[in-house]
Image (tube, rainbow, N blue to C red):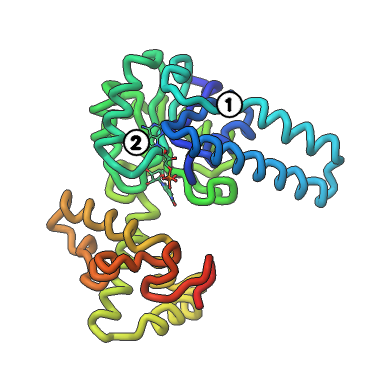
Amino acid sequence: MKIQKVGVVGCGLMGHGIAQVAAQGGHDVVVVESDPKALETGLARIDKSLAKIAEKAVEKGTPKEQAEAARAAARARLRGALGLETLADRDLVVEAIVEDLDAKKRLFATLHPLCRTETIFASNTSSFPIAEMARAGGRPRRTLGLHFFNPVQLMKLVEVVRTADTDPDVAAAGFEFAKACGKTPIAAKDTPGFVVNRLLVPFLAEALRMVERGDASAEDVDTAMMLGCGHPMGPITLADYVGLDTTLSILEGWRSRHPQEPVFAVPESLRAKVRAGLTGRKVGQGFYRWQGDKRV
Ligand SMILES: NC(=O)c1ccc[n+]([C@@H]2O[C@H](COP(=O)([O-])OP(=O)(O)OC[C@H]3O[C@@H](n4cnc5c(N)ncnc54)[C@H](O)[C@@H]3O)[C@@H](O)[C@H]2O)c1
């Protein structure tokens, strides 16, 4: 089961990166958007990123013509489109649309009659059960999670998520695809948050609960984890960086599906910040103040 023709749905933050690394990995790629402006922006980001990669390769000693040829070849393997029917002949379709379970289920249900019966469906969701999308998409044996990390061009990990129904050959094809994209795949089951977010999100929540209880200040919790554990960023800074609304929505989703799981409890301070519109770095204020990407 060799993946050659790839479709990516959504050309936002994640989708443009997935389309790019797939093209760099030698695949024929179509990236589909519902919003023409987002498609234009996403393709411009890909052009910029590929040009930067070529520039860096030259700095490291690759002959200019060779670097330029690699850039042009990757770009030539990728095209943008506005209609899902362009995905009919794909071996693999990866969705990277908004984090909305109903929207993802609707998308797979629409894709099912459009695509070949062999087409593998994958979701890049960070927090929803793959099995629910697989049922809506009508081909559970050929559906899996391919969870890339932000920024896709730099982050090396892909979580290959299999449900109870995913065909082992489909999971193996997902592994090979991730490797061809220059990534290191790991195998994960379809459990909340897979591996990375299951550990990370409750860690951020527990840091906030410590501050709520008055065990330590936010600054001291962050300093402790940086100097005591070698983390590049403390958990509360990281929550601001990722977006407090994103963290809240992940936790609330898990809590509603698994009310008995104590580590999914939602810290009140997180709710309060989001209610006040202080969602972190992107609005300049969360638990800390931000100027652009810098904490001030
Ligand atoms: N942002 C992250 O750090 C991150 C990391 C890992 C995984 N994810 C997951 O990746 C997915 C995408 O996140 P993002 O940050 O790239 O979002 P984004 O908002 O940047 O991009 C989503 C894009 O999908 C498009 N879109 C929405 N519905 C569509 C449809 N039906 N058909 C075609 N295009 C459609 C939108 O126009 C938008 O451009 C989400 O499931 C998210 O949870 C995000």
Q: How many labels were placed on the picture?
A: 2
- Kind of residue indicated by mark 1: Arg
Measuring 41% from the left and 22% from the top, which residue is drawn there?
A: 84
Specify the label residue 162 is tagged with.
2
- Residue 281 % position (x, y): 44, 66
Q: Amino acid at mark 2?
A: Arg
Whether residue 289 is situated above or below residue 63 in the rendered picture? below
**x 35%, y 64%: residue:** 279
> Judging from the image, what secondary structure is the residue with disc 2 in?
strand
Q: Residue at x 47, y 29 (%)?
A: 32
* Residue 159 % position (x, y): 43, 44
Q: Crowding at label 1, few (<14), some or many (≥20) Cα neighbours within 10 Å?
A: some
The residue wearing badge 1 is 79
User: Is any part of residue 99 visible from this angle?
Assistant: yes
129 sits left or right of 28 in the view:
left
Residue 124 placement: quadrant? top left
Q: Nearer the viewer, residue 96 or 173?
A: 96
Judge by depth and name the residue closer to the eye, 194 or 218.
218
